[in-house]
Amino acid sequence: MSIALSAADWLALLGHFLSLSLLAVGGAISTAPDMHRHLVMQQHWLSEAQFSSAIALAQAAPGPNVLFIALLGWQVGLNAAPASGLPPWVCALLGVSLSMLGTLLPSTVLTFSVARWGHRNRERRVVRAFKQGMAPLVIGILLATGIILATSQGTSAEHWPLWLLAAVTALLVWSTRIHLLWLLGAGAVLGGLGWV
């Protein structure tokens, strides 16, 4: 995939991640639906496969889940490299730098400031109510992310093994103490064997 990005497009990429950073209430993954809307559907800077692969790879890799944003920026940069005339690694690093700076800077400053204020005022009723009220919001955002990732592989009847695997995995996570990494490994084996 090849795209042409102007300086304004690179700034728009930074601006989009700056704005999403302040919405990342449940972590960076909670902003994936809007990233998908902007990067894949609106701007066409990434394909569906690139978007889903970046999230899947980052979630399977050890480390923080914010790694998927670096991979999304990397992919945008690689897609922009042929039209820019720059070496692919330069464009990829620019994409990583802009997306990570945009994601980390506002939320870090806000989190630090609010955490200090919240700790000083932890006995106030409004602080306790805010903490309790955020739980349903985070759950809803994470469900929206799950739906986008699940439907990217297809929703037709021919994809029933994927849906069955997702349902069984969710049930096992919810009702047992089986570690999630074992379930991820089982899913990888089933996918490697071509069963799902």
Image: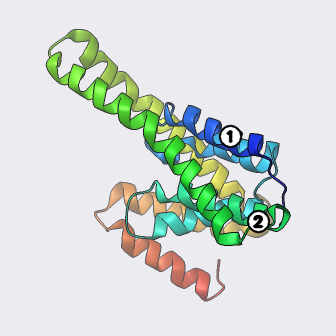
Q: Does residue 9 show up?
A: yes
Assign the C terminus to one quadrant of the image.
Answer: bottom right
The answer to whether residue 154 is seen in the rendering is no
Q: Residues within 10 Å of mark 1 (few under 14, many from 20)?
A: few
The residue type indicated by label 2 comes to Ala
Residue found farthest to the front = 86
Q: Are marks 2 and 1 in contact (CB under 8 Å)?
A: no
Circle 2 residue: 81
Q: Secondary structure at mark 2?
A: helix
Q: Position of residue 12 (x, y in %)?
A: 70, 38
Point out the tag, 2 or 1, that comes first from the N-terminus: 1
Whole-percent x, y for residue 91 in the image = 68, 62
Percent position (x, y) of residue 14? 62, 41
Q: Nearer the viewer, residue 190 or 7?
A: 7
Residue 24, above or below 77: above
> Observer-nearest residue: 109 or 175?
109
Which color scheme does this rendered protein use?
rainbow
Residue at the spot 28% in from the left edge and 63% down from the top edge: 177
Residue occupying the point 51% across, 36% down: 21
> What residue would you read off at disc 1?
11
| Amino acid under disc 1 | Leu
Numbered disc 1: secondary structure: helix
Quarter of the image for the N terminus: give it.
bottom right
Instruction: State the residue at coordinates (15%, 19%).
Output: 120
Q: Label 2 vs label 1: CA separation?
A: 16 Å
User: Which residue is most to the top?
Assistant: 125
Q: Is residue 133 left or right of residue 189?
A: left
Q: Compared to 5, does 188 lie above or below?
A: below
Choose between 194 and 14: the one closer to the eye.
14
